[in-house]
Protein backbone atom coordinates (compact mmCIF):
# COMPACT_ATOMS: atom_id res chain seq x y z
CA UNK A 1 0.00 0.00 0.00
CA UNK A 2 1.35 3.41 -0.98
CA UNK A 3 2.21 5.71 1.95
CA UNK A 4 -0.07 8.62 2.75
CA UNK A 5 1.00 12.15 3.51
CA UNK A 6 -0.17 15.60 4.52
CA UNK A 7 1.23 18.80 3.11
CA UNK A 8 2.55 21.23 5.73
CA UNK A 9 3.98 23.99 3.54
CA UNK A 10 4.73 24.99 -0.04
CA UNK A 11 7.16 27.83 -0.77
CA UNK A 12 8.24 29.24 -4.13
CA UNK A 13 11.53 30.94 -4.96
CA UNK A 14 13.28 32.11 -8.09
CA UNK A 15 16.74 32.94 -9.41
CA UNK A 16 17.67 34.81 -12.61
CA UNK A 17 19.19 32.77 -15.43
CA UNK A 18 21.12 34.56 -18.16
CA UNK A 19 21.72 32.64 -21.37
CA UNK A 20 25.15 32.34 -22.94
CA UNK A 21 23.54 32.81 -26.37
CA UNK A 22 20.04 33.49 -27.65
CA UNK A 23 17.78 30.45 -27.89
CA UNK A 24 15.23 30.88 -30.69
CA UNK A 25 12.44 28.38 -31.11
CA UNK A 26 9.32 29.07 -33.12
CA UNK A 27 8.45 32.75 -32.75
CA UNK A 28 10.26 33.16 -29.41
CA UNK A 29 13.83 34.11 -28.56
CA UNK A 30 15.06 33.74 -24.98
CA UNK A 31 18.10 35.56 -23.61
CA UNK A 32 17.22 35.31 -19.91
CA UNK A 33 14.41 34.09 -17.69
CA UNK A 34 13.95 33.19 -14.01
CA UNK A 35 14.33 29.67 -12.69
CA UNK A 36 11.65 28.51 -10.27
CA UNK A 37 12.46 26.55 -7.11
CA UNK A 38 9.81 24.78 -5.03
CA UNK A 39 10.27 23.75 -1.40
CA UNK A 40 7.64 21.60 0.28
CA UNK A 41 7.33 20.15 3.75
CA UNK A 42 5.21 17.05 4.26
CA UNK A 43 4.28 14.74 7.08
CA UNK A 44 4.21 11.07 6.11
CA UNK A 45 1.86 8.87 8.08
CA UNK A 46 3.95 6.96 10.62
CA UNK A 47 7.24 8.28 9.18
CA UNK A 48 7.54 11.87 10.35
CA UNK A 49 8.23 14.98 8.31
CA UNK A 50 10.48 15.58 5.30
CA UNK A 51 11.42 18.41 2.94
CA UNK A 52 11.43 18.08 -0.83
CA UNK A 53 12.42 20.32 -3.73
CA UNK A 54 12.09 20.82 -7.47
CA UNK A 55 13.24 23.36 -10.05
CA UNK A 56 12.33 24.46 -13.57
CA UNK A 57 12.74 27.52 -15.76
CA UNK A 58 9.79 29.89 -16.04
CA UNK A 59 9.93 29.78 -19.83
CA UNK A 60 8.19 32.60 -21.72
CA UNK A 61 6.16 32.08 -24.88
CA UNK A 62 6.08 28.28 -24.77
CA UNK A 63 3.25 27.29 -22.43
CA UNK A 64 1.20 30.22 -23.72
CA UNK A 65 2.05 31.56 -27.19
CA UNK A 66 -0.81 33.98 -27.71
CA UNK A 67 0.65 36.83 -29.76
CA UNK A 68 -1.17 39.53 -27.80
CA UNK A 69 0.75 38.62 -24.64
CA UNK A 70 4.29 39.81 -23.93
CA UNK A 71 6.94 37.31 -22.81
CA UNK A 72 6.74 38.74 -19.27
CA UNK A 73 2.97 38.28 -19.21
CA UNK A 74 3.31 34.60 -20.13
CA UNK A 75 5.82 34.13 -17.30
CA UNK A 76 3.33 35.79 -14.96
CA UNK A 77 0.76 33.25 -16.15
CA UNK A 78 3.05 30.51 -14.86
CA UNK A 79 3.43 32.32 -11.53
CA UNK A 80 -0.36 32.51 -11.24
CA UNK A 81 -0.59 28.80 -12.06
CA UNK A 82 1.78 28.10 -9.18
CA UNK A 83 -0.13 30.23 -6.70
CA UNK A 84 -3.48 28.69 -7.66
CA UNK A 85 -2.04 25.20 -7.30
CA UNK A 86 -0.52 26.07 -3.94
CA UNK A 87 -3.93 27.07 -2.59
CA UNK A 88 -5.63 23.94 -3.91
CA UNK A 89 -2.96 21.58 -2.61
CA UNK A 90 -2.74 23.11 0.86
CA UNK A 91 -6.52 23.00 1.19
CA UNK A 92 -6.37 19.18 1.24
CA UNK A 93 -6.11 18.49 4.95
CA UNK A 94 -6.43 14.68 5.12
CA UNK A 95 -3.73 12.05 4.70
CA UNK A 96 -3.63 10.82 1.11
CA UNK A 97 -1.16 9.38 -1.37
CA UNK A 98 0.94 11.69 -3.52
CA UNK A 99 -1.12 10.77 -6.59
CA UNK A 100 -4.37 11.20 -4.63
CA UNK A 101 -3.29 14.76 -3.98
CA UNK A 102 -2.47 15.38 -7.64
CA UNK A 103 -5.62 13.74 -8.98
CA UNK A 104 -7.91 15.52 -6.52
CA UNK A 105 -6.52 18.95 -7.50
CA UNK A 106 -5.77 18.82 -11.22
CA UNK A 107 -9.36 19.26 -12.41
CA UNK A 108 -9.96 22.28 -10.20
CA UNK A 109 -6.58 23.66 -11.24
CA UNK A 110 -7.41 23.54 -14.94
CA UNK A 111 -10.88 25.02 -14.37
CA UNK A 112 -9.70 27.81 -12.06
CA UNK A 113 -6.90 28.76 -14.44
CA UNK A 114 -9.30 28.75 -17.39
CA UNK A 115 -11.47 31.25 -15.54
CA UNK A 116 -8.39 33.45 -15.21
CA UNK A 117 -7.52 33.12 -18.92
CA UNK A 118 -4.60 30.73 -18.34
CA UNK A 119 -4.49 27.89 -20.92
CA UNK A 120 -4.36 24.26 -19.89
CA UNK A 121 -0.66 23.72 -20.63
CA UNK A 122 0.33 26.65 -18.39
CA UNK A 123 -2.24 25.58 -15.81
CA UNK A 124 -0.55 22.19 -15.45
CA UNK A 125 2.81 23.81 -14.70
CA UNK A 126 1.94 24.60 -11.08
CA UNK A 127 0.90 21.06 -10.10
CA UNK A 128 3.80 19.57 -12.10
CA UNK A 129 6.40 21.45 -10.07
CA UNK A 130 4.68 20.88 -6.73
CA UNK A 131 4.28 17.16 -7.48
CA UNK A 132 8.01 16.77 -8.12
CA UNK A 133 8.88 18.40 -4.80
CA UNK A 134 6.32 16.28 -2.94
CA UNK A 135 7.73 13.11 -4.47
CA UNK A 136 11.24 14.17 -3.47
CA UNK A 137 10.11 14.64 0.13
CA UNK A 138 8.23 11.33 0.15
CA UNK A 139 11.23 9.41 -1.15
CA UNK A 140 13.44 11.04 1.48
CA UNK A 141 10.98 10.18 4.25
CA UNK A 142 11.05 6.53 3.20
CA UNK A 143 14.84 6.58 2.58
CA UNK A 144 14.56 5.30 -0.95
CA UNK A 145 15.49 6.47 -4.44
CA UNK A 146 13.33 7.52 -7.37
CA UNK A 147 13.78 4.37 -9.44
CA UNK A 148 12.98 1.90 -6.65
CA UNK A 149 10.21 4.09 -5.31
CA UNK A 150 8.48 4.43 -8.66
CA UNK A 151 8.85 0.73 -9.46
CA UNK A 152 6.98 0.05 -6.22
CA UNK A 153 4.41 2.77 -7.04
CA UNK A 154 5.29 4.83 -3.99
CA UNK A 155 3.07 7.65 -5.25
CA UNK A 156 -0.02 5.41 -5.60
CA UNK A 157 -0.60 6.10 -9.32
CA UNK A 158 -3.96 4.73 -10.46
CA UNK A 159 -6.23 5.01 -13.51
CA UNK A 160 -8.77 7.62 -12.38
CA UNK A 161 -7.28 10.13 -14.86
CA UNK A 162 -6.68 7.52 -17.58
CA UNK A 163 -9.73 5.22 -17.70
CA UNK A 164 -8.50 3.67 -20.97
CA UNK A 165 -5.88 1.84 -18.86
CA UNK A 166 -6.34 -0.82 -16.20
CA UNK A 167 -4.76 -0.92 -12.77
CA UNK A 168 -2.87 -3.96 -14.00
CA UNK A 169 -1.45 -1.95 -16.92
CA UNK A 170 -0.01 0.62 -14.49
CA UNK A 171 1.29 -2.01 -12.07
CA UNK A 172 2.90 -4.09 -14.83
CA UNK A 173 4.60 -1.08 -16.40
CA UNK A 174 6.01 0.32 -13.15
CA UNK A 175 7.22 -2.98 -11.70
CA UNK A 176 8.92 -3.95 -14.94
CA UNK A 177 11.04 -0.86 -15.35
CA UNK A 178 14.81 -1.26 -15.57
CA UNK A 179 16.22 2.29 -15.52
CA UNK A 180 18.69 3.14 -18.24
CA UNK A 181 22.29 3.53 -17.14
CA UNK A 182 22.98 6.01 -19.93
CA UNK A 183 20.77 8.49 -21.78
CA UNK A 184 22.17 9.98 -24.97
CA UNK A 185 22.17 13.76 -25.34
CA UNK A 186 20.09 15.09 -28.22
CA UNK A 187 21.81 18.32 -29.18
CA UNK A 188 19.50 21.19 -30.11
CA UNK A 189 20.22 23.41 -33.09
CA UNK A 190 18.13 26.53 -32.49
CA UNK A 191 17.00 28.84 -35.27
CA UNK A 192 19.67 31.43 -34.39
CA UNK A 193 22.46 28.87 -33.91
CA UNK A 194 25.40 28.61 -36.29
CA UNK A 195 25.30 25.80 -38.85
CA UNK A 196 28.79 25.81 -40.36
CA UNK A 197 32.22 26.52 -38.91
CA UNK A 198 33.17 27.40 -35.36
CA UNK A 199 30.25 26.86 -33.02
CA UNK A 200 28.36 25.06 -35.76
CA UNK A 201 26.69 21.67 -35.94
CA UNK A 202 29.90 19.70 -36.52
CA UNK A 203 32.03 21.58 -33.97
CA UNK A 204 32.83 19.01 -31.23
CA UNK A 205 33.15 21.77 -28.65
CA UNK A 206 29.55 22.66 -29.44
CA UNK A 207 27.86 19.29 -29.92
CA UNK A 208 29.80 17.46 -27.16
CA UNK A 209 30.03 14.28 -29.23
CA UNK A 210 26.29 13.97 -29.68
CA UNK A 211 24.88 11.28 -31.95
CA UNK A 212 21.38 12.76 -31.86
CA UNK A 213 20.38 16.23 -33.03
CA UNK A 214 17.16 18.18 -32.63
CA UNK A 215 16.67 20.71 -35.41
CA UNK A 216 14.28 23.60 -34.96
CA UNK A 217 11.94 24.58 -37.81
CA UNK A 218 10.53 28.03 -38.61
CA UNK A 219 7.27 27.09 -40.34
CA UNK A 220 8.43 28.26 -43.79
CA UNK A 221 8.89 25.12 -45.95
CA UNK A 222 11.37 26.71 -48.36
CA UNK A 223 13.51 28.36 -45.67
CA UNK A 224 13.44 25.24 -43.50
CA UNK A 225 14.41 23.01 -46.42
CA UNK A 226 17.37 25.22 -47.32
CA UNK A 227 18.61 25.28 -43.73
CA UNK A 228 18.14 21.53 -43.29
CA UNK A 229 20.17 20.91 -46.42
CA UNK A 230 23.05 22.91 -44.90
CA UNK A 231 22.76 21.01 -41.61
CA UNK A 232 22.71 17.68 -43.47
CA UNK A 233 26.05 18.50 -45.10
CA UNK A 234 27.55 19.19 -41.69
CA UNK A 235 26.21 15.94 -40.23
CA UNK A 236 27.83 14.04 -43.10
CA UNK A 237 31.22 15.27 -41.90
CA UNK A 238 30.90 13.93 -38.34
CA UNK A 239 32.34 10.52 -39.05
CA UNK A 240 29.79 8.77 -36.83
CA UNK A 241 26.26 7.54 -37.21
CA UNK A 242 23.74 10.20 -36.21
CA UNK A 243 19.98 10.64 -36.06
CA UNK A 244 17.81 13.75 -36.13
CA UNK A 245 14.44 14.95 -34.95
CA UNK A 246 12.64 18.03 -36.24
CA UNK A 247 10.69 20.41 -34.02
CA UNK A 248 8.41 23.10 -35.44
CA UNK A 249 7.08 24.40 -32.08
CA UNK A 250 3.61 24.89 -33.64
CA UNK A 251 4.91 27.06 -36.51
CA UNK A 252 3.41 25.18 -39.46
CA UNK A 253 0.07 26.87 -40.03
CA UNK A 254 -1.82 23.89 -41.42
CA UNK A 255 -1.56 20.51 -43.13
CA UNK A 256 -0.88 22.09 -46.52
CA UNK A 257 2.26 23.83 -45.27
CA UNK A 258 3.36 20.65 -43.51
CA UNK A 259 2.78 18.59 -46.65
CA UNK A 260 5.01 21.02 -48.57
CA UNK A 261 7.91 20.38 -46.18
CA UNK A 262 7.45 16.61 -46.10
CA UNK A 263 7.26 16.52 -49.90
CA UNK A 264 10.65 18.21 -50.04
CA UNK A 265 12.06 15.71 -47.56
CA UNK A 266 10.74 12.87 -49.68
CA UNK A 267 11.97 14.10 -53.06
CA UNK A 268 14.75 16.70 -52.72
CA UNK A 269 18.16 15.05 -53.09
CA UNK A 270 19.76 17.84 -51.04
CA UNK A 271 17.64 16.72 -48.06
CA UNK A 272 18.56 13.03 -48.20
CA UNK A 273 21.12 13.38 -45.37
CA UNK A 274 18.26 14.61 -43.16
CA UNK A 275 15.54 12.28 -44.45
CA UNK A 276 17.78 9.23 -43.97
CA UNK A 277 18.44 10.19 -40.34
CA UNK A 278 14.94 11.36 -39.41
CA UNK A 279 13.31 9.72 -36.38
CA UNK A 280 10.19 11.88 -35.98
CA UNK A 281 8.73 15.37 -36.37
CA UNK A 282 7.59 17.14 -33.22
CA UNK A 283 4.52 19.37 -32.83
CA UNK A 284 4.35 20.75 -36.37
CA UNK A 285 1.06 22.68 -36.09
CA UNK A 286 -0.54 24.92 -33.44
CA UNK A 287 -2.13 22.98 -30.60
CA UNK A 288 -5.68 24.06 -31.48
CA UNK A 289 -5.18 23.10 -35.14
CA UNK A 290 -3.63 19.77 -34.18
CA UNK A 291 -6.80 18.29 -32.70
CA UNK A 292 -8.77 19.25 -35.82
CA UNK A 293 -6.30 17.89 -38.38
CA UNK A 294 -5.94 14.14 -39.02
CA UNK A 295 -2.51 13.50 -40.52
CA UNK A 296 -3.75 11.04 -43.12
CA UNK A 297 -0.94 9.80 -45.40
CA UNK A 298 1.54 12.10 -43.64
CA UNK A 299 1.38 9.86 -40.58
CA UNK A 300 3.86 7.45 -42.16
CA UNK A 301 6.65 9.96 -41.52
CA UNK A 302 6.24 9.72 -37.72
CA UNK A 303 4.87 12.66 -35.75
CA UNK A 304 4.65 13.40 -32.03
CA UNK A 305 2.85 16.04 -29.99
CA UNK A 306 4.40 18.30 -27.38
CA UNK A 307 2.63 21.61 -26.82
CA UNK A 308 -0.67 19.86 -27.67
CA UNK A 309 -0.10 17.57 -24.67
CA UNK A 310 -2.27 19.61 -22.33
CA UNK A 311 -4.49 16.92 -20.79
CA UNK A 312 -4.48 13.28 -19.73
CA UNK A 313 -6.41 12.30 -22.87
CA UNK A 314 -4.15 14.17 -25.30
CA UNK A 315 -2.09 11.12 -26.34
CA UNK A 316 -5.18 9.02 -27.07
CA UNK A 317 -6.66 11.89 -29.10
CA UNK A 318 -3.39 12.32 -31.02
CA UNK A 319 -3.19 8.59 -31.72
CA UNK A 320 -6.60 8.76 -33.40
CA UNK A 321 -5.25 11.53 -35.65
CA UNK A 322 -2.23 9.50 -36.79
CA UNK A 323 0.42 10.58 -34.27
CA UNK A 324 2.67 7.84 -32.95
CA UNK A 325 4.37 9.58 -30.04
CA UNK A 326 4.27 12.16 -27.30
CA UNK A 327 6.93 14.04 -25.38
CA UNK A 328 7.90 13.63 -21.76
CA UNK A 329 8.80 16.82 -19.91
CA UNK A 330 8.68 16.91 -16.15
CA UNK A 331 7.35 20.49 -16.38
CA UNK A 332 4.17 19.09 -17.96
CA UNK A 333 3.71 16.53 -15.19
CA UNK A 334 5.71 13.45 -14.21
CA UNK A 335 2.58 11.36 -13.59
CA UNK A 336 1.30 12.14 -17.08
CA UNK A 337 4.64 11.02 -18.50
CA UNK A 338 4.35 7.71 -16.67
CA UNK A 339 0.74 7.23 -17.79
CA UNK A 340 1.67 8.00 -21.41
CA UNK A 341 4.63 5.62 -21.28
CA UNK A 342 2.27 2.93 -19.98
CA UNK A 343 -0.04 3.62 -22.92
CA UNK A 344 2.82 3.46 -25.42
CA UNK A 345 3.93 0.09 -24.06
CA UNK A 346 0.39 -1.30 -24.14
CA UNK A 347 -0.43 0.00 -27.62
CA UNK A 348 2.89 -1.20 -29.04
CA UNK A 349 2.09 -4.76 -27.96
CA UNK A 350 -0.25 -4.90 -31.00
CA UNK A 351 2.70 -4.54 -33.38
CA UNK A 352 2.48 -0.81 -34.20
CA UNK A 353 5.16 1.24 -32.48
CA UNK A 354 4.13 4.04 -30.15
CA UNK A 355 6.66 5.86 -28.01
CA UNK A 356 7.39 8.62 -25.52
CA UNK A 357 10.33 10.92 -26.23
CA UNK A 358 12.59 12.91 -23.91
CA UNK A 359 12.29 16.63 -24.60
CA UNK A 360 13.47 19.67 -22.67
CA UNK A 361 12.74 23.29 -21.84
CA UNK A 362 16.37 24.14 -21.07
CA UNK A 363 16.54 22.15 -17.84
CA UNK A 364 19.27 23.77 -15.81
CA UNK A 365 22.19 22.05 -14.10
CA UNK A 366 21.16 20.83 -10.66
CA UNK A 367 17.70 19.72 -9.61
CA UNK A 368 15.93 20.42 -12.91
CA UNK A 369 18.15 18.41 -15.23
CA UNK A 370 18.59 15.58 -12.71
CA UNK A 371 14.89 15.06 -12.06
CA UNK A 372 13.97 15.26 -15.73
CA UNK A 373 16.84 12.93 -16.67
CA UNK A 374 15.77 10.40 -14.03
CA UNK A 375 12.23 10.44 -15.41
CA UNK A 376 13.54 9.84 -18.94
CA UNK A 377 15.76 6.98 -17.75
CA UNK A 378 12.87 5.40 -15.85
CA UNK A 379 10.37 5.42 -18.71
CA UNK A 380 13.01 4.25 -21.19
CA UNK A 381 13.79 7.34 -23.31
CA UNK A 382 17.17 6.33 -24.74
CA UNK A 383 18.01 9.88 -25.86
CA UNK A 384 16.80 13.23 -24.56
CA UNK A 385 17.03 16.83 -25.66
CA UNK A 386 19.35 18.63 -23.22
CA UNK A 387 19.50 22.37 -23.77
CA UNK A 388 20.90 23.79 -20.56
CA UNK A 389 24.43 22.58 -21.19
CA UNK A 390 25.01 24.91 -24.15
CA UNK A 391 22.46 27.73 -23.87
CA UNK A 392 23.50 28.55 -20.30
CA UNK A 393 27.04 28.84 -18.95
CA UNK A 394 27.21 25.84 -16.63
CA UNK A 395 25.39 26.57 -13.38
CA UNK A 396 24.94 30.20 -14.44
CA UNK A 397 24.16 32.50 -11.51
CA UNK A 398 24.06 29.65 -8.98
CA UNK A 399 26.30 30.37 -5.95
CA UNK A 400 29.65 28.61 -6.27
CA UNK A 401 29.15 26.62 -3.07
CA UNK A 402 25.84 25.23 -4.32
CA UNK A 403 27.30 24.26 -7.70
CA UNK A 404 30.25 22.60 -5.98
CA UNK A 405 27.89 20.65 -3.71
CA UNK A 406 26.01 19.26 -6.72
CA UNK A 407 29.28 18.37 -8.45
CA UNK A 408 30.64 16.60 -5.36
CA UNK A 409 27.43 14.60 -4.86
CA UNK A 410 27.02 13.74 -8.55
CA UNK A 411 30.52 13.42 -10.03
CA UNK A 412 29.26 11.36 -12.97
CA UNK A 413 27.07 14.30 -14.07
CA UNK A 414 29.29 17.33 -13.54
CA UNK A 415 32.93 18.29 -14.02
CA UNK A 416 35.10 21.39 -14.05
CA UNK A 417 37.38 21.38 -17.08
CA UNK A 418 38.70 24.85 -16.38
CA UNK A 419 35.60 26.85 -17.36
CA UNK A 420 33.52 26.25 -14.27
CA UNK A 421 31.31 23.30 -13.35
CA UNK A 422 29.35 22.01 -16.31
CA UNK A 423 27.31 19.02 -17.35
CA UNK A 424 29.62 16.07 -17.95
CA UNK A 425 28.90 14.27 -21.22
CA UNK A 426 30.51 10.85 -21.79
CA UNK A 427 30.85 10.07 -25.52
CA UNK A 428 27.54 11.78 -26.17
CA UNK A 429 25.79 10.26 -23.15
CA UNK A 430 24.74 11.28 -19.65
CA UNK A 431 25.21 8.73 -16.89
CA UNK A 432 22.44 8.06 -14.40
CA UNK A 433 24.29 6.21 -11.63
CA UNK A 434 24.30 8.99 -9.04
CA UNK A 435 20.60 9.66 -9.66
CA UNK A 436 19.93 6.57 -7.52
CA UNK A 437 20.52 8.76 -4.46
CA UNK A 438 17.85 8.91 -1.76
CA UNK A 439 15.15 11.35 -2.87
CA UNK A 440 14.14 12.44 -6.35
CA UNK A 441 17.43 12.08 -8.22
CA UNK A 442 19.46 14.45 -6.06
CA UNK A 443 21.55 14.28 -2.90
CA UNK A 444 21.56 18.09 -2.75
CA UNK A 445 18.98 20.82 -2.35
CA UNK A 446 19.42 24.44 -3.42
CA UNK A 447 20.89 26.99 -1.08
CA UNK A 448 17.52 28.35 -0.01
CA UNK A 449 18.92 31.49 1.63
CA UNK A 450 20.47 32.51 -1.70
CA UNK A 451 17.10 32.52 -3.49
CA UNK A 452 14.57 35.30 -3.63
CA UNK A 453 10.84 34.69 -3.12
CA UNK A 454 8.78 34.11 -6.25
CA UNK A 455 7.87 37.46 -7.76
CA UNK A 456 4.20 38.37 -7.54
CA UNK A 457 2.56 38.42 -10.98
CA UNK A 458 1.57 41.83 -12.29
CA UNK A 459 -1.95 42.74 -13.33
CA UNK A 460 -2.78 43.72 -16.90
CA UNK A 461 -3.25 47.29 -15.71
CA UNK A 462 0.33 47.33 -14.39
CA UNK A 463 1.63 46.23 -17.79
CA UNK A 464 -0.38 48.94 -19.54
CA UNK A 465 0.70 51.66 -17.10
Image (cartoon, grey):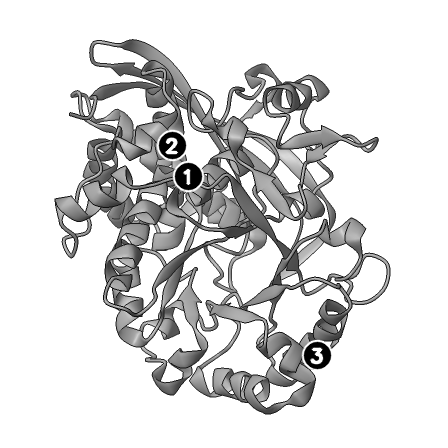
Location of residue 38 in the rendering, given as x and y in whole percent from the top left corner? 45, 28
State whether residue 372 appears in this view: yes
Judged left or right of residue 330, residue 188 is: right
Q: 230 above or below 111?
A: below
Residue at the extreme bottom of the image, as rendered: 267
Q: Write the residue at 49% across / 29% down.
A: 435
Q: Write the residue at 35% across / 26% down.
A: 134
Location of residue 14 in the rendering, given as x and y in whole percent from the top left corner? 56, 30
Location of residue 434 in the rendering, given as x and y in whole percent from the top left corner? 53, 27
> Could you tell me how far apart the alpha carbons at marks 2 and 1 are, in whole angstroms?
7 Å
> Could you tell me how far apart the alpha carbons at marks 3 and 2 are, in whole angstroms?
41 Å
Q: Which residue is mark 2?
A: 147
Quarter location, residue 51: top left
Query: In the drawing, what numbered circle is on residue 179?
Result: 1
Q: Write the residue at 26% across / 38% down.
A: 175
State whether residue 26 appears in this view: no
> Could you tell me how far apart the alpha carbons at marks 1 and 3 are, in whole angstroms?
36 Å
Q: Which residue is mark 3?
A: 229
Q: 111 above or below 441?
A: below
Q: Secondary structure at mark 3?
A: helix
Q: Are marks 2 and 1 in contact (CB under 8 Å)?
A: yes
Dot 3 or dot 2: first in sequence order is 2
Quarter location, residue 423: top right
Q: 52 above or below 79?
A: above
Dot 1 or dot 3: first in sequence order is 1
Q: Secondary structure at mark 2?
A: helix
Q: Write the residue at 36% across / 70% down.
A: 288
Q: Are marks 1 and 3 in contact (CB under 8 Å)?
A: no
Q: Quadrant of the N terminus?
A: top left
Front residue of this view, candidates 256 and 171: 171
Q: Secondary structure at mark 1?
A: loop
Dot 2 or dot 1: first in sequence order is 2
Amino acid sequence: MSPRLKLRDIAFFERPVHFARPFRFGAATINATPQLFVRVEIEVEGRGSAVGASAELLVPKWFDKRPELSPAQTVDGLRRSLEIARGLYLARSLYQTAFDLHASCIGAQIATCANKNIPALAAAYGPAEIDKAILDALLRALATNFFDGMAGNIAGIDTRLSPDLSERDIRTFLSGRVPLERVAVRHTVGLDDAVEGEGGVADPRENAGARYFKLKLSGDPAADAARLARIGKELDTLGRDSKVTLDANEQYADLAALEALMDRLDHDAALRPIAARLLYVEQPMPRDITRQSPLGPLASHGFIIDEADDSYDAFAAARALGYCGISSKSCKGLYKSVVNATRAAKWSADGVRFFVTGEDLTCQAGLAVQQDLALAAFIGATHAERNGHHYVDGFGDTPAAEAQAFAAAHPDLYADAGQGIRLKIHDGDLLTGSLHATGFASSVHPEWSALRPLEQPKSLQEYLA
